[in-house]
Amino acid sequence: MSAFRRTISNVLAVAYKETALLRHDRTLVQNVFLQPAIMLLVFGYALSFRPTNVRWAVLDRSESTASRALVAEIGASGYFEPPRRVESYGEARRLLREGSVTAVLVVPSDLRRRMERGRPEVQLLLDGTDPMTAARVSGYVTQIASHVGLRSDPGLRDRGGTSPATRTGPEAGVDLRQSFRFNPTLRDLDFYLSAMAGYLLTNLCLSAAALSLVAEKENGTYEQLLAQPTRPIEVVVGKLLPNVAVSYLSLGLATIGAGFFYGFWPRGNMLLLLLVTLPFVLATLSIGAFVSTLARTSAQAIFIAVFFIMPSFVLSGSMLPYELMPHGVRELGGLFPLRWFQVAARRVIVRGASLSEVAVPILVLVAIFCVLLAAIRRMMKPRLG
Amino acid sequence: MSFRRLWILMRREALATLRDPFTISILVAVPLMALLLFSSILSTEVTGLPLGVLDLSDGPTSRRIVRELAAGGNFAPTRWSSRPAIESALRSGDLGAAIVLPPDLERRRGARGEGSAAPQVELIYDGGEAVLAANAEAYLKSLVLAAVGRATREETPVVVVPPTSGDRSRAPDVAAGGDVVPAEGPAGRAAAAAGPAPRPRGSGAGGIRVVPRALFNPTLDGRPFMVAGTFGFVLSFAATLIIAVSVVNERFAGTFEQLQVTPATSIEILLGKVLPIGAVFSVDVVLMMLVAGWLYGVWPAGSALFFVLLSVFYMVVSLSLGMLISATSATAAEAVSKTVLLSTPLIQLSGFAFPVRNMSTPFRWFAELIPATHYIRMSRAIYLRGEGPLTLLPEIAIIAAMGLGLGALALRAIGRRT
């Protein structure tokens, strides 16, 4: 029997034993069913940077038709709650300071006169606490306001004012048309559902693998394991293999769930998605196993794993686009397998990319996996003391 | 409750913690790492986004527009020769956005009379990156309108000074003529980050110009927001996990059962664990405040003392939750999977990064049930808006009520023999 075949046979034997154990694992049900269910709900209904239910107030010193039209238009956009009326700047500032409103629209008393002169202006006071929301609310209001006068003028209306989100009028010298590929209405839902698989698998693989070897250390069976005729690396790979199957099960459920409940099916080739998942799952599992070789108690393993999970969510760009992060942080995120997986998964799921377009992330993930495997092998060299 | 017994329990906990270098380094490293990593991740300013240019006119105007787009540093324009090439680059993620300049840009520029159709410039974004696309839209649209506005107003063809980045800052002067690059300073930054700039006036076409002005954070910097939120992350997540694992470890070693059979009551066991770890986290809070202040210049706008007191108060609540998790888990593995399962949605729903108000109604209610939501909200109110204890009283009351509930549950769980 060749060495290679012996390796395969050893790995499969360990995998078989681990599968038998896994079947009795209480956390399996949680990982495979509960976690995807919770994530589907949270990612589908809760995560969004698009401001909705915005609370705002109006300080209207002009009481003109134009100001009333502006307020009505803003209300009709659907992003805002009915406005509160305030009588003074002091009151406006107080509401902003308390956080009871996000924005206050201040209409000057001479709005009508300014309009006749052709330069009407209003002020928008924003609560800058949350910059993302402030910026977007300001964008909505600016956009809506720029069309208010146009509505009353039928001649211009059909040229510029019909669809504020995608067109501007000809005044600027050009007719600007905008479109969003792959996600025409720019739903945040697509962005987060396409990242969900990455979150799910990171949680699952790390928490499963981080405890794999440390438990043997705590039970005192680690030395026995090293003394077996199977090589340590074969044991590790054998231990990780059943989790690959669990990962695919979980991924399948999440994908079907997203399609079924939100109508969000992967646009690209399903097989390609499965192919991208393999090196990612292996890389993440081997990070867990590496943590397990480092830690002396399961408590330590947990800490390291959890404090690896959190930054990888944040820095990988699955939560916030990494393109907006400063250099240094952006590159640091490249060390996390999740970064490359989310890039590849989004390409396949949202953009329907082909194999050549996700080749780079796949190769990086394979490289990460190989480096980690070598590191684990080194760490597991039987040593005395 | 005997204070002597409590003191002994606290000493025991402190000694056990100090003895273990791993725990100590976790206690100091995690808060500082979190602060350094999270503080810079939220930004609304697009920099160096790859922008594909399909220039069908290839005249002085279009070249000038492209130069102006490159000058600001927000976009990195590259020239492409065909539409399919651009589409494929968008799909593979090589481009974040694209602009198509029409062939008639030049011709129309010279001879455009009243009523003739304006040349059609097309902007295409990669909607797959929805958050990025929304931010890019705001910048690109106003930059293009500004550049086109300037280019088309020039009487002579563009032999004039090549635009530099200085061009952008000069923009406000031209604003009277209908320029769309937002003014500098607070309002300008907000408008630039926000979107479509105001329309040019003068034709009597209508439309109202909005002058935005952001209070409390005039430059719309993401840092104070994230720094204030990171306190919530550390005190909720790290604190809960550390105490949960510490108790599970004791269970594993059998020392927790020994504690249960001593004369010490449940409340003494609870406080004997919570107070020493709480003290370490109080030091962490002060340390984080100093690091955020020195490194990023982010100091609380309100009272620092009030903030520390509030944090200590919240920490006790959060540690009670940790005790509850650990007292109800049999093994370390169970405590982990419980914490991991709980933590992801908790972090996402607490408003740490995603505003609670954007969520759908059931989730908004659910978010209100999480103590971290209230703490993070208060932390931002103090750090950014400088609020005092009086206006925050309702939030404090909510946390106190939750603390009592969690504490009672934790006490019951500790008292239970397994």
Image (spheres, coloured by chain):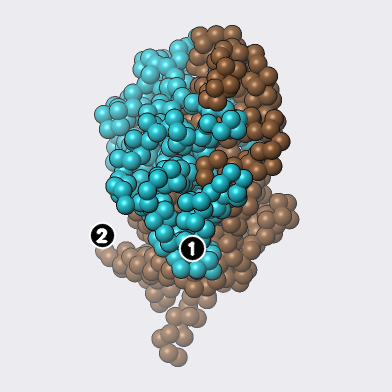
Chain colours: A brown, B cyan
Q: Chain of mark 1?
A: B
Q: Quadrant of the C terminus of chain B?
A: top right
- Amino acid under disc 2: Gly
Instruction: Say which residue appears at 30% left-offset and 32% top-offset.
Output: B296
Residue A315 in the figure: left or right of residue B206: left
Residue B321 in the figure: left or right of residue B58: right
Q: Chain of mark 2?
A: A
Note whether A380 is above or below B247 in the view shown.
below
Q: Which mark is residue B56?
A: 1
Instruction: Say which residue appears at 36% left-offset and 45% top-offset.
Output: B72
Picture coordinates of residue B156, whole percent (x, y): 37, 48
Residue B296 in the figure: left or right of residue A245: left
Q: How many residues crowd around disc 1 within 10 Å: few (fewer than 14), some, or many (20 or more)?
A: some
Callout 2 secondary element: loop
Instruction: Say which residue appears at 35% left-offset and 67% top-offset.
Output: A371
**Residue B27 seen from this side:** no
Q: Which residue in the protein does label 2 denote?
A: A385
Note whether A325 is above or below A268 in the view shown.
above
Asked if labels 1 and 2 share a chain, the reply is no
- Residue sitting nearer the eye, B216 or A383: B216
Tell me if label 1 and label 2 are in contact, CB under 8 Å. Answer: no
Instruction: Say which residue appears at 26% left-offset and 64% top-offset.
Output: A384
